[in-house]
Image: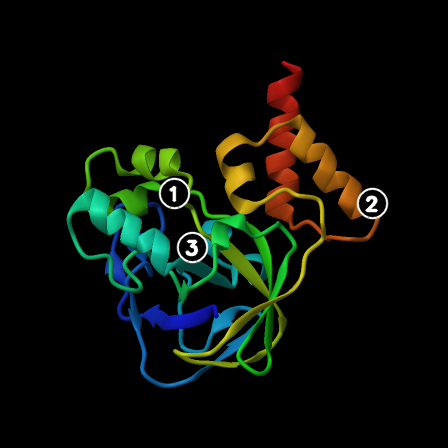
């Protein structure tokens, strides 16, 4: 059974050398249940909503199994929240989720998988690992962002259920690792047929793929 291992929100804003000047990547587990609304967890902060927040990226999810992979690769613990994730899940291959797939978490919360995480320089500084962005990218275990379809409270131990899949076959992992014209075609066809509503970030990513493949 898939379940929530930990719910994480910002512990403190940290100084960062980005143009924002601070980062909210320092997420830590909380012991009580938290309400989730369209912009994310109650009490959480998204310092850079252009790249890491807003309603299309209300929550970032990482899998316990993928964290265990990195623990082995890096020879260090990867506790919940270290990657800046809001939810650490167990028992669900989050990278195999189709874009537009919906999950129910707990009794009320319904979320939709919107797009993969793109690693950035802030993440590199957070980890302090040589060539971290390149290594994270090559491993193709990015974890997805989620939008909130129906608000609700969540906490550690809540069950996670996949309630719908759009059926286009394009997953978080496949798009992150090898986005191409064929996958773009499948996504756009699914949107025309009303099986998925792609977020702005995905439309921009598709446009970039089209430009690259037509050059």
Q: In the rendered structure, which disc, 1 or 2, sits on the residue that comes first in sequence?
A: 1
Q: Where does the image place residue 57, in percent across and percent down from the top left?
A: 52, 58
* Residue at position x 67%, y 16% in the image: 214
Label 1, label 3: how far apart the Cα atoms are: 14 Å
Q: In the rendered structure, which disc, 2 or 3, sits on the residue that comes first in sequence?
A: 3
Label 2, label 3: how far apart the Cα atoms are: 31 Å
Q: Please, what secondary structure does the residue beneath circle 1 have?
A: loop
**What residue would you read off at disc 2?**
192
Q: Residues within 10 Å of mark 1 (few under 14, many from 20)?
A: some
Outermost residue, front side: 1
Q: Where does the image place residue 23, in percent across and percent down from the top left?
A: 31, 57
**What residue would you read off at disc 1?**
119
**What residue would you read off at disc 3?**
48
Outermost residue, right side: 193
Which callout, 1 or 3, points to the residue nearer the camera?
1
- Is the Cβ of the residue at disc 1 closer than 8 Å to that at disc 3? no
| Vertical arrangement, residue 89 with respect to residue 156, above or below | above
Closest to the observer, 206 or 80: 80
Which callout, 2 or 3, points to the residue nearer the camera?
2
Q: Is residue 154 visible?
A: yes
Q: Please, what secondary structure does the residue beneath circle 2 have?
A: helix
Closest to the observer, 130 or 169: 169
Q: Where does the image place residue 79, in percent across and percent down from the top left?
A: 25, 62
Q: Please, what secondary structure does the residue beneath circle 3 have?
A: loop
């Amino acid at each position: 059974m898939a379940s929530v291992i930990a719910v994480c929100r910002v512990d403190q804003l940290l100084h960062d050398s980005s143009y924002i000047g601070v980062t909210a990547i320092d997420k830590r587990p909380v012991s009580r249940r938290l309400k989730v609304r369209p912009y994310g967890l109650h009490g959480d902060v998204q310092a850079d909503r252009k790249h890491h927040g807003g309603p299309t990226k209300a929550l970032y999810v990482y899998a316990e199994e993928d964290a265990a992979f990195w623990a082995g690769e890096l020879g260090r613990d990867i506790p919940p929240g270290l990657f800046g994730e809001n939810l650490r899940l167990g028992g669900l291959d989050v990278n195999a989720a189709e874009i537009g797939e919906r999950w129910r978490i707990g009794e009320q919360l319904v979320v939709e998988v919107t797009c993969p995480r793109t690693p950035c320089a802030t993440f590199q500084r957070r980890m302090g690992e040589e060539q971290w962005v390149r290594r994270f990218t090559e491993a193709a275990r990015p974890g997805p962002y989620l939008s909130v379809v129906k608000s609700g409270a969540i906490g550690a131990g809540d069950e996670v259920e996949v309630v719908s899949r759009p059926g286009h076959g394009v997953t978080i992992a496949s798009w992150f690792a090898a986005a191409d014209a064929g996958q773009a075609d499948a996504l756009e066809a699914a949107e025309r047929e009303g099986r998925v509503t792609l977020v702005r970030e995905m439309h921009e990513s598709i446009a970039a793929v089209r430009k690259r493949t037509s050059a």
